[in-house]
């Protein structure tokens, strides 16, 4: 009896487990079927038509500002600083006194040398008279002439030393930080102060060799960057290097800019745009419409269904991009004029996804945007 009772209990448990497993399997199959039939709600997006526009034909590069004239004024001869005649950071004219070294030794020697040269001149005049009278020989006259020239050369050497120790501005410009102190003993070549001409100023930049045929002196350039926020300074190409750099296959160019305010300083980097003749026709879309990826950039093209009951879908289209200006970017291949692309929220889309177009809160795209937090 006990064995039959245990057998019935085991059979009952097996039947119960089978029922529970069957119910659970039915639930799982129902969930799988529901998942297959589930259609996610359309994703809300903003859109914009691909439009054709005419842009200036520009070549862009990053340039570096250099002074038209710039030098570190240094001592030509060794000597002690006896006078500093400039204020750091001020503007000076060509020939203005910058620094005076001690010339007391040379000034003490100069009167004696001048007197010796005067005596030599007098002896030379007497020798000329005596030679004409036939009293002295030509050799005696030549000796007197050589002595005079030696004495005069000694005077010129002392005066040249005094002039070299009287350091003056080689050209007009703006001074930098003072690097010497009163009473300091300078050695030959020791720096004293930097001197830069700021107006006009050069901007050096490079462009690929493929664009060499389009470049020539006189082409206008437009310079922008952090030194002049929100502004552009115009200038012209003044030098085209005849040599293409063999390591980079690029061509060096130099443009000259007016800089009356002095905001542009040597050593700054700026953005340079060379304006070429004519204009180029481009297809433009908002930069926010592009899904950037390492393998290729893409956009989502909005496709209207033939069946009104079906929703609007998007198609992922790979594109090749060109120049960027403001909020817009040019598309060289992949799109046609008049097509509609998703202008924002592309990171949450996938190919073939259903979308709901809502342009009520679409951002205003501009060529010269001015963000509020600026």
Image (cartoon, grey):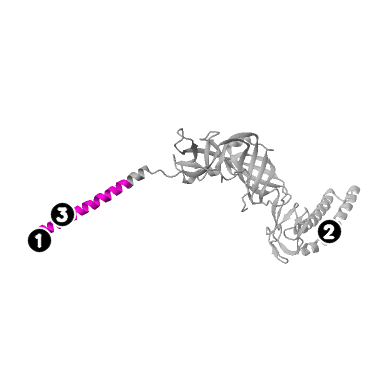
Magenta region: which residues? 1-30
* Helix, strand or loop for the magenta stretch, by majority: helix
Does 164 lie within the magenta span?
no
Mark 1 near mark 2, Cβ–Cβ under 8 Å? no
What residue is shown with label 1?
2
Q: Residues within 10 Å of mark 1 (few under 14, many from 20)?
A: few
* Residue drawn at point x = 73 percent, y = 64 percent: 81
Q: Which residue is mark 2?
A: 114
Q: Secondary structure at mark 2?
A: helix
Q: Position of residue 189 (x, y in %)?
A: 68, 57
Dots 3 and 2: beta carbons under 8 Å? no
Helix or strand or loop: what does disc 1 sit on?
helix
Comes first in the chain, label 3 or label 2:
3
First reached walking from the N terminus: tag 1 or tag 2: 1
Mark 2 neighbour class, 10 Å CA radius: few under 14, some 14 to 19, many 20 or more:
some
Say what secondary structure mark 3 lies in.
helix
Nearest to the eye among marks 3 and 2: give it.
3
Q: Which residue is mark 3?
A: 11
Give me the residue at 58% from left, 42% from top: 328
**Quadrant in which residue 324 is drawn:** top right
1 vs 2, front mark: 1
* Residue sitting nearer the eye, 150 or 304: 304
């Amino acid at each position: 009896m006990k064995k039959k009772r245990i057998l019935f209990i085991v059979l009952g448990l097996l039947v119960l487990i089978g029922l529970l497993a069957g119910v659970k399997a039915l639930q799982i199959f129902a969930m799988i079927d529901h998942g297959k039939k589930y259609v996610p709600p359309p994703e809300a997006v903003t859109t914009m038509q691909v439009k054709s526009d005419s842009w200036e034909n520009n070549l862009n590069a990053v340039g570096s500002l250099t002074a038209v004239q710039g030098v570190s004024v240094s001592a030509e001869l060794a000597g002690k600083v006896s006078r500093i005649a400039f204020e750091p950071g001020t503007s000076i004219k060509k020939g203005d006194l910058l620094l005076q070294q001690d010339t007391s030794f040379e000034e003490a020697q100069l009167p004696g040398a001048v007197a010796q040269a005067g005596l030599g001149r007098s002896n030379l005049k007497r020798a000329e008279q005596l030679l004409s009278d036939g009293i002295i020989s030509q050799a005696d006259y030549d000796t007197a002439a050589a002595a005079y020239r030696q004495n005069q050369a000694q005077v010129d050497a002392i005066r040249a030393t005094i002039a070299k120790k009287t350091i003056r501005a080689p050209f007009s410009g703006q001074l930098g930080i003072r690097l010497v102190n009163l009473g300091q003993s300078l050695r030959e070549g020791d720096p004293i102060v930097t001197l830069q001409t700021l107006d006009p100023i050069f901007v050096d930049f490079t462009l690929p060799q493929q664009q060499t045929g389009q470049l020539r002196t006189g082409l206008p350039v437009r310079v922008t960057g952090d030194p002049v926020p929100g502004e552009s300074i115009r200038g012209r190409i003044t030098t085209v290097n005849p040599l293409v750099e063999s390591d980079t296959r690029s061509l060096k160019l130099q443009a000259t800019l007016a800089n009356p305010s002095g905001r542009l300083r040597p050593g700054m980097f700026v953005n340079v745009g060379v304006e070429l003749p004519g204009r180029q026709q481009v297809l433009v879309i908002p930069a926010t419409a592009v899904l950037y990826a390492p393998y290729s950039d893409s956009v989502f093209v909005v496709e209207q269904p033939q069946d009104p009951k079906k929703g609007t879908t998007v198609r992922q289209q790979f594109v090749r991009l060109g120049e960027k200006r403001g909020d817009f970017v040019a598309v060289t291949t992949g799109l046609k004029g008049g097509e509609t692309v998703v202008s924002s929220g592309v990171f949450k889309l996938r190919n073939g996804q259903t979308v709901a177009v809502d342009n009520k809160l679409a951002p205003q795209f501009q060529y010269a945007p001015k963000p509020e937090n600026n």
